[in-house]
Image (cartoon, helix red, strand yellow):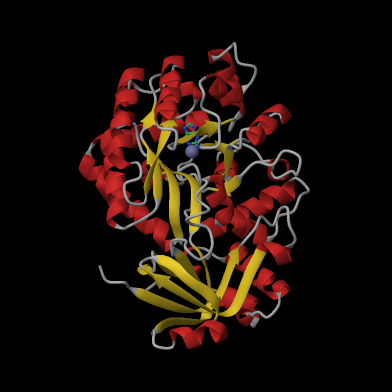
Amino acid sequence: SQTSIKAFRGAFFDCVADPFYGSVEESIRYIPDGLLIVENGKIKEFGSYEHLQPQYSDVEYIAYPDKLIVPGFIDLHVHYPQTEMIASDSNQLLDWLERYTFLTESKFKDPDYSQHIAQFFLNELLRNGTTTAVVLAAVFSESVDAFFEAANSRNLRMIAGKVMMDRHAPEYLLDTAKSSYEESQKLIEKWHNKNRLLYAVTPRFAITSTPQQLHLAGKLLQEYPDVYLHTHLSENVNEIKFVAELFPDSLDYLQVYEQFGLVGKQSIFAHGIHLSDSEFQRLSETQSAIAFCPTSNLFLGSGLFKLHQAKSREYPIPVGLATDVGGGTSFSLLQTAHEAYKVTHLQGQNLSGLQALFLATLGSAEALSLDDKIGNFEIGKEADFVVLDGRATPLLALRTQGKIHAKTIEEIADFIFSLIILGDDRSVAATYILGEQAYIRS
Ligand code: GUN
Ligand code: ZN
């Protein structure tokens, strides 16, 4: 096969280490006039234009002189079947699930409908600069097939799974422990590691799974040790009360999952709003990840995630940002970072723009143990990236004046912060997948 070489010139920003633990200087990389060389979808060279230009003088480059190029955003937790029910008014989590969610998800037994929404959803991700996501489908295998087919045809790196739920939901949405095991197994065989796709065993949450179903979810993880475990944890106070009633032998919510072998390095838990110190500590010891979903946590009134505790030096937990659409209110990880900033402020803590951007890129890649493939512009990684426009709106243009050509770390930090607070899908000028343009703002 022929080699394809592509080159991109512009200002580049990425994270090379975790800015929650190291200094800004050692955690970030900013190249005001850089060149990115992509060969067959992977990063072949990355550095300053001046330095690399002589070597690649015969390669035509695509130039983005007034833009900032950053790694593709990673959404660590999102429900594709809930796309159409975003912004549904209700009480908190359990009421919202009963009033809107279950009925909406019932439509995903239909493969055509699933495919239609999967395509819409992926368009929406790309419009927002999101190139990888950890996605819940619905309970129906058809909904998983439709999603993976759509993602595969666009060469996207996506993680998804069939929701397992065999109790406490309407009959039309329930599987059984046995059928959920068998169907998940088939889906793993069919999709896991197919091109860029990966599978997540996805029990919805402790309320909607019998012990037998959680046991079989654990069996799947033993049989396929490199698949993910993806579920919800400790989001809402009434949810937690119900879990305590359903699992009286468990000391806390996390222990329910621990008992069934569902807690470990491949596990991603959404929310974790009301965790005890002991639960934080056990998540750290097992290297489990938390998906921080601030727009959802505020919208559903779930509470404030203790980011500073999750990112403590003593018991660090891998954390990534997540939209949790349809509980979340935006597909934009810029807007999500904005809400994350407010959530930390409400607790007397701080979150810098650079830290927030880390949580949307390299932080999530690390949480997924995919930091050898995505998350920044290291040589050898997959070339998924976003072109950000600091002049997307009149207000942004006014606010970012001059900073588009930032010279210092302070200037680039300020530029990124203003993009997070004022930006959204309008600030995404283009999105590239494996070096190919997958979205361009018209
Ligand atoms: N817990 C169980 N199911 C869901 C869901 O669909 N959304 C959210 N936010 N929390 C959940
Ligand atoms: Zn969710």
* Residue 134 rendering spot, x and y as whole percentages: 45, 45
Residue at left offset 35%, top offset 58%: 123
Q: Is residue 421 left or right of residue 103?
A: right
Quarter occupied by residue 27: bottom right
Q: Is residue 326 above or below residue 414?
A: above
Q: Is residue 90 left or right of residue 420?
A: left
Front-most of residues 144 and 41: 41
* Residue 440 rendering spot, x and y as whole percentages: 38, 71
* Residue 262 rendering spot, x and y as whole percentages: 51, 27
Residue 362 visible to an observer of this rendering: yes
* Residue 148 rendering spot, x and y as whole percentages: 31, 46
Q: Quadrant of the C terminus?
A: bottom left
Front-most of residues 383 and 338: 383
Q: Is residue 271 left or right of residue 9?
A: right
Residue 428 visible to an observer of this rendering: no
Q: Residue furthest right?
A: 348
Residue at left offset 52%, top offset 24%: 261
Q: Is residue 281 above or below residue 356?
A: above
Front-most of residues 58 and 129: 58
Q: Quadrant of the N terminus?
A: bottom left
Quarter occupied by residue 406: bottom right
